[in-house]
Amino acid sequence: MIGHQLDHSKMCCTKFSASCACIDRVVMKKLRLLNMSQTLYFLAEKKPAGRDFVFLLDGSDATRSGFPAMRDFVQSVVQTLSVDDSKDRVSVVQYSREPAVQFYLNTYTTQGEILDSVRGLRHKGGRPLNTGAALQYLSDNVFTVSAGSRRLEGVPQVLILLSGGRSADNVDAQAAALKQLGVLTFAIGTRNSDSKELQKIAHSPTYALSVSEFNDLPSVRHLLKSTPDIFFMEITPESPTIPEFKNLARLMVSSQVYFKCSQLLFSCLFSVDTAKKDIVFLLDGSDGTRNGFPAMLDFVERVVEKLNVGENKDRVSVVQYSIDAEAHFYLNTYTTKDDIVGSVRGLRHRGGRAPNTGAALQYVRDNVLTSSAGSRHLQGVPQILILLNGGRSSDNVDTPASTLKQLGVLTFAIGTRGSDSAELQRLSSDPSHALSVSDFTDLPSVQEQLSSVMSRLNMSQTLYFLAEKKPAGRDFVFLLDGSDATRSGFPAMRDFVQSVVQTLSVDDSKDRVSVVQYSREPAVQFYLNTYTTQGEILDSVRGLRHKGGRPLNTGAALQYLSDNVFTVSAGSRRLEGVPQVLILLSGGRSADNVDAQAAALKQLGVLTFAIGTRNSDSKELQKIAHSPTYALSVSEFNDLPSVRHLLKSTPDIFFMEITPESPTIPVDTAKKDIVFLLDGSDGTRNGFPAMLDFVERVVEKLNVGENKDRVSVVQYSIDAEAHFYLNTYTTKDDIVGSVRGLRHRGGRAPNTGAALQYVRDNVLTSSAGSRHLQGVPQILILLNGGRSSDNVDTPASTLKQLGVLTFAIGTRGSDSAELQRLSSDPSHALSVSDFTDLPSVQEQLSSVMSRVLVRSTPRTQTVTAEKKPAGRDFVFLLDGSDATRSGFPAMRDFVQSVVQTLSVDDSKDRVSVVQYSREPAVQFYLNTYTTQGEILDSVRGLRHKGGRPLNTGAALQYLSDNVFTVSAGSRRLEGVPQVLILLSGGRSADNVDAQAAALKQLGVLTFAIGTRNSDSKELQKIAHSPTYVYFKCSQLLFSCLFSVDTAKKDIVFLLDGSDGTRNGFPAMLDFVERVVEKLNVGENKDRVSVVQYSIDAEAHFYLNTYTTKDDIVGSVRGLRHRGGRAPNTGAALQYVRDNVLTSSAGSRHLQGVPQILILLNGGRSSDNVDTPASTLKQLGVLTFAIGTRGSDSAELQRLSSDPSHALSVSDFTDLPSVQEQLSSVMSRVLVRSTPRTPTVTGKKVTDFYIPKS
């Protein structure tokens, strides 16, 4: 209705060429009705938009007698809902061993249809009761857009679980996942249920209800009758928001909201407990602070004396850093003030060159502010970081500082005269939290100031808020185009801002205002928390001076707002539910891309108005704006008063959109993958037999088998070697026999960091037998005899992120702090006097392993394919060390020759150049220049950097953190290929393994070009693959066009060859042949593979076996039915994933070619299909599941990439009836694919001198 009025208004304005007063009235009305659809908070409308109800019913054998009562309960609730007017939706799922959907949220649209379906429900039966798997299924398949969920539109999601017994599997991770999705869960059980388990599953323990038996369900039914009309939420730093209900009678006690549900009081007051704080001291221990270090320790001691230390009160950690960082003790190490003070007094100055403050902040983020290290950020306890710094950082601090701000960490940066004051402000959570003293002996002068702030710490520094009756106001950010082109119009822009500010309620602390001006880069004029009165804001706005500069990088400016302005530290109250409004005034087209950045603001819930002039790009403004109707236009900035009144009205209704995180893989704790990593260096020679005995004893306790526990053993010293992999042996005897035959490796002090990385890259992989993708717990047991010779932090952090449970067992020669950093939890760092004492920790280890639950989250980022490629982003990393001085002109010429082949002027390709030696230096970013001429001019002017040593690892890390980023112009998140060309003239002085792996994970295609002085093995590690090392670059064709090409498809037919399909098999082959006849087969066109399965699977031919239609058809005609018992469809899907949809088998998913799987199935699977089906969905595979009357329709829907892709025929002879439907969808498919590294070939050169052709 509003859209219709707006369109009509535009017509009348055009017709009469008037001042658009008609638009004014309509948009004012629209603003009054406005829902902040993109914000993380909503107040309920008087008439709610509805709710999505999902009932999860225990259909196991134990509930057979109670099932009619469960069915009656569902009916009684449904009768109270508003289904017929399209408000409420309902889904029912029944489960025992596995879940089965009775109907989805979008299956029925009337109450009558739902009631009819519920009345017809039949008890499922089966055992055991896998509640965890059922909850995971709901996350992956029911609370989704395709299944009818309106979660992303802000519609409340309600789950009502009726359970009659304890779950046979673990529910923790799955329940947490639903909470992260914002699902409000009621868990209703009987006397046979586990009350603690129900409390874990429920939204909060008070939402876990109990009845004696299911016949008593009417006693709790009334709890769900009332329409929830007020919602509020508790936000944790790493999870989306969780709506909560007001049930039945509402009690308002001051500003606190309680709920009365029968006799149950929902005390839903989850405010931050400011009586508790987690405080981390980060001390600069570099050479420059040696004299001041005692004063730093005194300062820490004095602050601690003021705290209320205790396990459930204040917690303290101390970290010291120079080149790298080390935790002296964690937040959960000590629970008394005396212990902390005693430890602080015993600290020794670390020493080391200029400090790497950025790396230290990242260390604190990854290793200290974590639950395992004692951080209580997930419980809403304030996180405070106090940095004592004596000099400018040697590395970049912006990204890690921004990360801490996003987590809501309150950072105080205290520096001396040697510090960089601007850097301290960037490090701090708020510029006012950057404090300075002449030297560290003056620290007492800031202690009172620090204590004062900490003592009054309130919600503004936390990720929690309570709902209030009335919105607290709005946060307005004005983003002003200050480029050269707007110089004459700037006074009018300034006047416009003033006129809007005059209408706001600033003085009563409701509204806040920030102004940012930008051209090439943004500059904050003032933040949302800089001024608290209207007068101060108006004075500041009047004094604004035009910035000037070019080009106009609107995308970078929007990104800057996300990272630095719409944040708690900058005064944003977004997490408290306060509406966030951005008003952009732009006078021209952006020189950089705005898509990803605009989308990011929408995800944050920012309501954006984009106002442009005749020189602006209207389509670009529409992309940026909250919706196209919020993109406004004036002839010139002097006409801004004509749109001013659009912003006068107060938006008073808000709701939320939550961006889903990656789903969590269900854990199968009946199986474990265990890797023993044995220190085989010289120092462990005597203890090695005892280490082998320990391994043997642990293995004896395991349940070894291909589908049970698997074991691998790796030994290391300088480098690592796998003695056998997880899939080498399948019996206990074979493993024990191999262990008994091991010989001590020997070698100097151990490189534990490199060994961990080796395990990550070579052992914990599918090809080596790891089942982490199936959710099987991954356990690493390290036996270590001494301190590592290399850095362990990055590889240890990588393993933690993968969900690997690491136990680090050391001797008296080990470094106990290092063992704690290596372990997945500090409590998993165990110690013995020497290895002969290992039996003393075996029982402890076995006990923990027996109850381990590992959460493993796939971290894929998806991009949507486009018909036309957007280009490529090229980054050149040039060795500028002393050793390449004479070769530098040739390197420069090479860069120019490549740039001349690129399509820069039509905005397809972008280029950045970085030079490095000890540290990297950016010559220009990907968004610095927009023409080939500008890039070539800059490259010609490059001067050799010089310096030593050559730190290639640090340079690669810098690229990950600062160049392959949205703010630096990278379009990686838009699916644009990222190409790195490294020109290196020598061996790196630092380690490159983790950094190279990080770039590969980002999807960067790396070419490593070296000289005779380079280390070929090192280059192979860095490069995308060993064949990408050394190139004859003058003849290298960079065919890096890897956007999705929907003119090509990779199609895999997966045929059920079990006994039940014998009669229908000829019809299946006919169907395959008919589909193939419709394809455009060719090596660079459509490719086809056929796989047949029953108990196990076998590929008849791969995607790269045949390149002509005739060959494929001929092979299909010759296929014979396989036979075998009931089909293992789950294993077959995994087989396709691991063996067919791979580059070596001809899959082109890395080039963005759509991956299509067509399953022809004749019966229910004998194994579980959920995990492998979910894995294929995450990879972007489009799966069609076609079944017969013997198939399980609910299973087919779970197998398919979308429930609508589950097709059914009476028997296989009816397959022609679905062929047309299948072809139609395939012809228009756009597959979402994960950006990974594409493929190019090259030839060897031996020097940087490359003759021009």
Image (cartoon, rainbow, N blue to C red):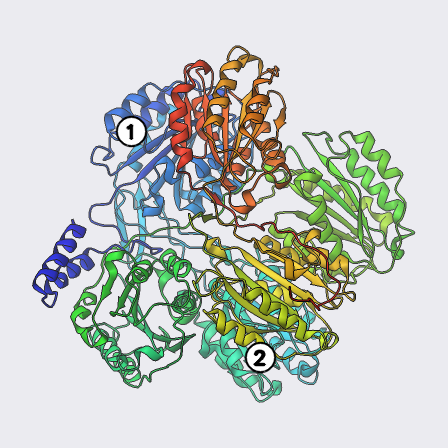
All told, the count of numbered labels is: 2
The residue that mark 1 highlights is 108
Q: Where's the C terminus, which quadrant?
A: bottom right
Give whichever of 969, 1248 is nearer the camera: 1248
Local packing at callout 1 (Cα closer than 10 Å; few below 14, some 14-19, many 20+) is some
Q: Does residue 809 appear to the left or right of 241 in the view shown?
A: right
Local packing at callout 2 (Cα closer than 10 Å; few below 14, some 14-19, many 20+) is few
**Disc 2 residue type (three-letter):** Gly
Residue 501: percent from the left, percent from the top? 24, 75
What number is the disc on residue 144?
none
For the question of whether residue 1163 can be seen, the reply is no
Q: Residue furthest top?
A: 1063
Q: CA distance from mark 1 to mark 2?
A: 68 Å
For the question of whether residue 136 can be seen, the reply is yes
Dot 1 or dot 2, earlier in sequence: 1
* Residue drawn at the location 38% of the way across and 70% of the way down: 571
Quadrant of residue 32 within the rendered picture: bottom left
Residue 1078: percent from the left, percent from the top? 45, 28
Vertical position of residue 293 compared to residue 825: above or below: below
Quadrant of residue 960 within the rendered picture: bottom right
Vertical position of residue 1197 compared to residue 318: above or below: above
Residue 648: percent from the left, percent from the top? 19, 67
Q: Does residue 1149 appear to the left or right of 796 in the view shown?
A: left
Helix, strand or loop status at disc 1: loop
The residue that mark 2 highlights is 941
**Disc 1 residue type (three-letter):** Tyr
* Residue drawn at the location 29% of the way across and 35% of the way down: 89
